[in-house]
Image (cartoon, helix red, strand yellow):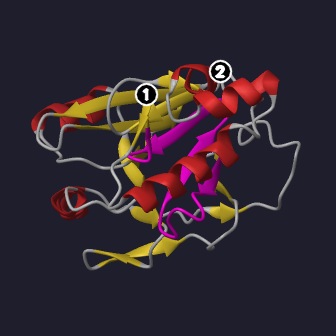
Amino acid sequence: MSTPDVLPASDEDPCGKGGKLPGLRVIPYFSPISRTNCYIVAGRNASEAILLDPVHLDNELYSLLLQHNLTVRWVLVTHPEAYMRHALRTLCRIYSYQLIAGASDMFGITCEHLVPEEVNRLLIGGLQVQALPVLPHSTSSYMYRVGELLFTGTIVHAGTLGETASAYNEELLVATMKDMIFTIPEAEREMLLLPAVGPPSTVRAERHLSPYYRDHSERA
């Protein structure tokens, strides 16, 4: 089983910071059981893939992997969710994979624990991936950036945000996302947001259309 390498910080990272990825395959799959999206991510000619935010491994998802001749070798989690328990345990029976998350353990499965409070730069399957901590909203939540794609999990949906336990937590999440979204350079605002819930969006669309950021956008 391959272990992801930690890369030194570099503004010249073409895949992890706004670079084009013409050889990248991203295959979305919607699970009718958890009613969430997961994403299969792999290089154009690769046989090993990343599964991002795992869902129940039903016949359709397994057939999709077979159709593209892909084996799951890495599982990335944006935020630990209860619906992932069955998915992770089923995947263990079929694949030898490495679990990468903002926790040391998920449902008895040891994780490659991301460094807290830091942007983690990883080399996974030949792809350079940035794991971006969603602080101070949550110490266990990360969004993953690969080139001009940002996998946001249940944290950000198109036009809205994920559920929170209280009004205070919602305000904290809004403030956190404003800090992240409104510091993205103008040239990178067509970056595609791929959430676990709902359709994709872009940074530019969220800045101008989401009611959570409207006041901030008008001042920007």
On the image, which quarter does residue 198 sit in? top left
- Image height of 217 relative to 107, above or below: above
Q: Is residue 135 magenta?
A: yes
Between disc 1 and disc 2, whose residue precedes?
2
Disc sitting over residue 22 in the figure = 2
- Comparing marks 1 and 2, which lies closer to the viewer? 1
Disc sitting over residue 39 in the figure = none
- Image height of 76 relative to 107, above or below: above
In screen coordinates, is 220 left or right of 125?
right
Q: What's the magenta region?
A: 129-156
Q: Are marks 1 and 2 in contact (CB under 8 Å)?
A: no
Query: Can residue 131 be seen here?
Result: yes
Quadrant of the image containing the C terminus: top right
Which residue occupies the foreground of this view, 97 or 39?
39
Which residue occupies the foreground of this view, 74 or 87?
87
Which residue occupies the foreground of this view, 48 or 217?
217
> Rounded to the nearest whole Å, what is the CA distance between mark 1 and mark 2?
25 Å
Rendered residue at 28%/26% (across/down) = 67
Rendered residue at 46%/65% (across/down) = 101
Mark 2 Cα shell of 10 Å, populated few (<14), some (14-19), many (≥20): few
Identity of the amino acid at label 1? Ala
Report the residue marked by disc 1: 158
Q: From the top left corner, tell me how far across and down residue 40 is, in percent.
A: 40, 37
- Image height of 79 relative to 207, above or below: below
On the image, which quarter does residue 47 sit in? top left
Rendered residue at 81%/43% (across/down) = 13
Q: From the top left corner, tell me how far across and down residue 30 is, in percent.
A: 24, 31
Q: From the top left corner, tell me how far across and down residue 158 is, in percent.
A: 43, 28
Badge 1 marks a residue whose secondary structure is loop
Badge 2 marks a residue whose secondary structure is loop
Mark 1 Cα shell of 10 Å, populated few (<14), some (14-19), many (≥20): some
